[in-house]
Amino acid sequence: MIDATFADFDRPAPQSTGINRVPEVTPGFWVIKLMAVTMGETAADFLAVNLGFGLGATTILMSAVLIAAIVWQFRQRAYVPAYYWFAVVLISVVGTLITDNMTDALGIPLITSSIGFTLALAATFAAWFAVERTLSIHEVFTFRREAFYWLAILFTFALGTAVGDLISEAFGVGFAGTGVLFGLIIASLALGYFALGLDGMWAFWLCYIFTRPLGASFGDFLAQPAEFGGLGLGTIVTSFAFLAVIAATVLVMTTKAAPKLAE
């Protein structure tokens, strides 16, 4: 996993006086990101299937909650762990539901969704850079930059879901095999960054994309029945277990961030 030095790329200029509203990239960042994407996969299934809401109603409900969370996040003047990671968990769920709707409700092939979300993400990065002349996550201190940031994150979750499902289901690799595959890809990106001079900005965003299918495959492996290649723990146990880990990690982050927020 990428360590704290991964936060050293693309630092803001010394003269910048803006207060960043997103977190630094640390080991804790990647831990909670992986937990959030894992929970996003299992929580979407839990709400749509186990609670019987159905795909359409679950999508509408969670999208409404996500919008409220994003509005609250935008109202913050600095990075507040609880608000930020609550939004990430919700966007993970909604990103999963968007792809599921395209596949299950609209019958759009996963390869088409993967290509479409890749183009959408590329267009978001192009527009972000054209307007702001930077894609730095260390200088997200204006409304417009934060809007680009969250739009990019939404597309990374939707893209990661589509690619993960494409490989695990359509290509028949399975949950465990897909998790191992994307774990190796992330490890190679880390090696490229630390040893081969891979650009830090792109290393970050590629890892951000690929942690989605890694986490989703892990979540499905734990939750799905044995006949589908899983351990059969169920979406309830899996979702709440990862929610507990997320809550504990956010509590630690909040405790560490409290002195800075009080300044």
Image (tube, grey):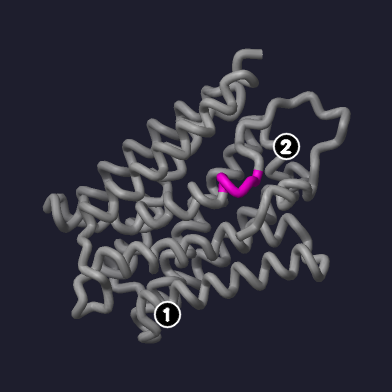
Is residue 74 in view from this perspective?
no
* Residue 99, image x, y percentages: 37, 63
Query: Residue at 59% of width from left, 73% of height from top?
Result: 185
Residues in magenta, as a range = 25-29
Would you identify the image quadrant in which residue 176 lies? bottom left
Query: Residue at 15% of width from left, 50% of height from top?
Result: 53
Taking the magenta stretch, the answer to whether it contains residue 26 is: yes
Magenta span: chief secondary structure: helix
Q: Return the mark for residue 139.
A: 2
SS at badge 2: loop
Q: Tell me the amino acid under the disc marked 2.
A: Glu
Q: Is 249 left or right of 123, judged from the image as shown?
A: left
Q: Tell me the amino acid under the disc marked 1.
A: Gly
* Residue 222, image x, y percentages: 30, 65
Pointer 1 residue: 177
Q: Is residue 257 above or below residue 29?
A: above
